[in-house]
Structures are given as C-alpha cells and as structure tokens.
Amino acid sequence: MSGHSKWSTIKRKKGALDAKRSKIFSRIVKEIEIAVKLGGADPEANPALRLAVSNAKGANMPKDNIQRAINKADKDPSDLQEATFEGYAPGGVAVFIECLTDNHLRTVGNIRAIFNKRGGNLGTHGSLGFLFDRKGVITVDGEKIEDKESFELEVIDAGAEDLEITEGIYYITTPMEEFGNVRKKVDDMGIEAENAGLQRMPNDLKQLDLDSALRVLKMVEEFEEDDDVQNVYHNLDVTDEVVKALE
C-alpha cells in the first residue's frame, strides 16, 4: 500500500471514529461556493459544481444541505479565495497546504503559528511544488461495485495509471489530463464515488523514526482542523510501524 493510501485510510477511520462529518461538510460547502462563483449554479453546465455535488453525495451530505449551499452561493456570492502554503515539518518532511479563505491575513497567521508551534517552518510560495505531482484520485467503496474485475478493466482502459484496494476501498489514481475521462467512466457505470478530485502526490517519500513521524502527523492533523484548510499533502513515508501506532 502506498503512503498516500495508508494516510487516506487512517483519516477515513479517524473521521468515522471522531465524528468529523461537520468538518467534511464545511469543506464541501466551500467547494460548492467557489464552483458556483466561478461557473454558475447549474451543475449540468458547471463541471466544477457537478464534481463538488458528487463529492457531497459521496460524503452522505443530505440533498437539502447541498441545494441550500448552492442557493446561498448563487444569491450571495462568497468572498472566498484560494490560497496555498508550503513549508517543512520537523525532519525535513515537505508539507503543501490548500486553503479557501475570506481573510488571507488570518489564514497566513494561523498556518505560520502551527508551523512554529510544531517545530517546522513556512516556506516561500512555489518553493516545494516540484516535490508533488498533480494527479486525479477517485475513491470508491468496493461494496458499490458488482463486477469488480470488469470495473478494474474499464477504469484502466479509460486512463487510470494505478488502482489500489485497501480494506475494501478502491483508490484510483490518474494522470491529471485523464482525470475527467476516468471520472466520467465511473459515472457511466452508475457507481457513485466517495470522493474525486485533483490531489498533490509526493514524488519522493521521506522516512523518519516512529516518534518523529508521529510528530509530523500531529502537525498535519492540526492543519486539517483549521477551518480555512481544505487539503494537506506531505511526503512522509507512512510505514507499517506508523500505521500500527495510530490504530
């Protein structure tokens, strides 16, 4: 299992155990608001909104909540702006943070404070981008797939470059340019993905001793708990020893 899939599985379990659904919903609502602001309130004519709605359904957000978020964004466009931050955690682990914020100064202050508190340092914009590749990632619950062999062949033919199965969850990775094709293929097969989108995948992993790795993941969790943070990516090698310590 790759470090990405291990960390995704850990977060999935912790999300269920810690009842962090409200935080997940908050992130999705922001995605909906940005999508409506950029492309309008009609999912059929707005691919970004269609994807956000699909992710909302995959996270089991009630339909009324989804429509309410769309209506609110359409009537009162938000001032949310995208922002990214890059830096290093202890041990030289690279961290890339994606945010949606209505107050850039507040977000910068919060991100810098977490880096300082946890013994890391905030870098300059663009300083770590070369350590991550943009990839499409689609997550599907295996229970929703009737013919698993056919499903795997179909998504590979559509352009998937990697497919991992962890505890019944399919993690489909695609080149950025093939993401739309693979996402459409999953939709055409009548399968609802839990989540789909472009992510930043590390092209080189950094392995640390157990205590240092756990400190890095504590920092990552603290970033993820910030209301302005949408996604946190890192290049820590989440070894089996680390996974066991987190269980």
Image (cartoon, rainbow, N blue to C red):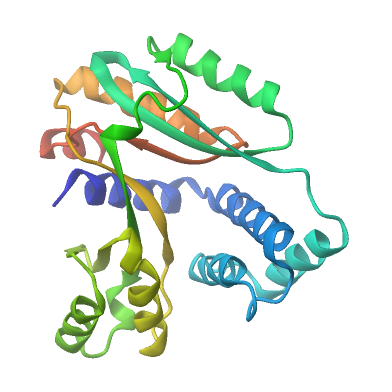
Instruction: State which quadrant residue 73 falls in.
Output: bottom right
Q: Nearer the viewer, residue 1 or 42?
A: 42
Identify whether 231 is placed above or below 212: below
Q: Nearer the viewer, residue 72 or 183?
A: 183
Instruction: State which quadrant residue 141 falls in.
Output: bottom left
Residue 112 appears left or right of 150:
right
Q: Nearer the viewer, residue 53 or 85?
A: 85
Identify whether 92 is placed above or below 1: above
Quadrant in which the C terminus is drawn: top left
* Location of residue 109 in the rendering, given as x and y in whole percent from the top left corner: 62, 17
Q: Residue at x 81, y 67 (%)?
A: 71
Q: Nearer the viewer, residue 179 or 237?
A: 179
Q: Residue at x 53, y 72 (%)?
A: 54
Identify whether 226 is placed above or below 63: above
Residue reaching furthest to the right: 75
* Location of residue 14 in the rendering, given as x and y in whole percent from the top left corner: 39, 46
Q: Residue at x 58, y 47 (%)?
A: 23
